Image (cartoon, rainbow, N blue to C red):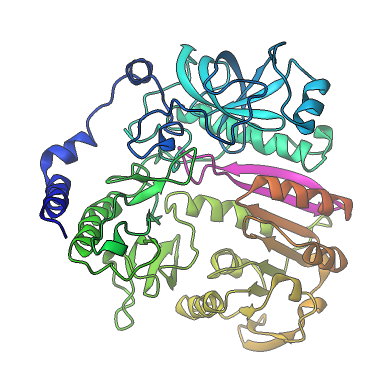
Amino acid sequence: MHPSQRQKIVAMLALLSCTKFSRAFHSPVQNLSQRIAKHSILSTSLKSTTDNDQVASVVPRKFKPFPFQYHEELTLKVDSLTNRGIGVCRAEIPKSAVPADDDQRDSYEKDDKNWVVFVPNTIPGETIRCKVYRNYGSYSDADLLEIVEESPDRVEPPCPLFEECGGCQYQHMNIKSQREWKTSQVQELLERVGKQDPSSFPAALPTVGTVEVYNYRSKITPHYDRPVNVDIGDVEIRAIGFKKKTNRQLVDVPYCHIATEAINEKLTDYREEKFKEALEGRLKKRKKGATLLLRDALKYEQHDLTSEEQVVETDPNVYVKTNVKDLTFRFLAGNFFQNNPYMLPVMVDHVVESAIKPNAAGEKMTHLIDCYCGSGLFCLSASKEFDVCAGIEVNEKAVEEAQFNADLNSINNCKFVAASAEAIFNSKDPVEVVTTDEEGKEILSSTLVKDFPKDNTVVIIDPPRKGCSVEFLEQLDAFSPARVVYMSCDPATQARDAEFIVNSGYKITKVTPFDLFPQTRHIESLVIFEKC
């Protein structure tokens, strides 16, 4: 390594640890309008076109000059937000604009006064000035230059990296406005994507949240890119953080405002450790970047299950635990487990309360099927209200954790199966559980899921972001349980699945959004379906 390069890296490490550097990232920031006027451009998508972060003056080679020229400035009104948290504006196409291809010509001919322009970091109702940097077949992307008329819902983001970091989308909006938009988005998706007549189901309830809107997240996964200069022997990591809002470049994040304070303390040490590894050449063999893990949880000690020692685990293969209400859950630090400990008990209460209500005939619900059960969160939390519970999860490690958690909490009426959700209704493996008769005697019962009493069975669904497969929904239809409790991390795919479920003879009886991740666009949505 050249001496001058080594000096640069040493200086960088020193800067990371100095008090001034820390203060710089925690000091109050200027008013957003003042910052925009001072720096001219809010987003950094234009800056990424050159290595030295200067705004490119040369038109990109693949830029399509219709309907707007490169860096053409527009003054627009923000109409709404996309499900990605980006402002939606509409612009009139200039009469002088010439379509670049057939797709654009078709869009132009359909409506020359309704061209969509997406502008991040804006709020509906605002008038803004923006600069176009990309045109597509029917819309354009632009950077925010100036807020001409500011929304009363706008607040100063506490994070100085909010403008460019893609981790948060809503820090510039007050929390009341954030939650109102999340409610309206869930409602709109059920109507538009799910094709549900708004008169056919109760309107989405106000988004449920807690007072913890910063420093709540108990897991983050920052990244760093492939170390540079590997081929010539010098290794350097330039950023450890998250992707930018408008491209795949990384923003260096020394402090994450939505992560817990324990994670941020660990992040400081972790960053210095990784920079040091690069400095000492220990990353020379790494040809790619990496995703890091920081999980704030309780330490799991097999010999002392009562331990409440808090840890921030960085090894995905180490067991940790957490308490949710009166239950304890053990899981691998790298496995999926909801990471807002303040909202989790609230969500569990809503799911359980929805599941245990009597059926249409006023009878008790006796059987529970938990699809995509993970480590058993919902199934185990509701277990004492049901006679028999069955959970299914494709991740074998998660199934092992679920069964362990049942034993850990002395729950003996739950059985977990490692298989895809599609297999649950046709499984030939009996659900063997221990139940108690009226005299208090324990009885071992064995039942196939397909033989569960349909009128007294509730199915909980908590699928990944892609939603449910058609095969699963068809089997759900064939099984025809009395109630479906559908929790989703993607209201769009939930709305798509809702159309299928409703067409299978169900009606929506309740819609509840949850603000699991304040300051971000992400929404958890709970929809209850009852058999008609």
For the image shown, how many numbered marks are present on the structure?
Answer: 0
- Is 119 displayed left or right of 306 in the figure? right
Say which quarter of the image contains residue 184.
top right
Quick check: can you spot residue 500?
yes
The answer to whether 403 is drawn above or below residue 259 in the figure is: below
Percent position of residue 181, x then y: 59, 30
Percent position of residue 144, x then y: 48, 22
The answer to whether 84 is drawn above or below residue 113 in the figure is: below
Q: Which residues are magenta?
A: 506-532
**Residue nearest the observer in this picture, 149 or 532:** 149
**Residue nearest the observer in this picture, 358 or 144:** 144
Percent position of residue 56, x then y: 43, 29
Q: Residue furthest bottom?
A: 444
**Residue nearest the observer in this picture, 181 or 238:** 238
Say which quarter of the image contains residue 203.
top right
Taking the magenta stretch, the answer to whether it contains residue 219 is no
Percent position of residue 49, x then y: 44, 36
Q: Main secondary structure of the magenta part?
A: strand
Residue in view at x 38 percent, y 16 percent: 33
- Is 414 displayed left or right of 274 in the figure? right
**Residue nearest the observer in this picture, 161 or 417:** 161
Q: Quadrant of the N terminus?
A: bottom left
Quick check: can you spot residue 357?
no
Residue in view at x 64 percent, y 43 percent: 512
Residue in view at x 50 percent, y 76 percent: 401
Residue in view at x 29 percent, y 58 percent: 229
Taking the magenta stretch, the answer to whether it contains residue 516 is yes
- Is 24 displayed left or right of 185 in the figure? left
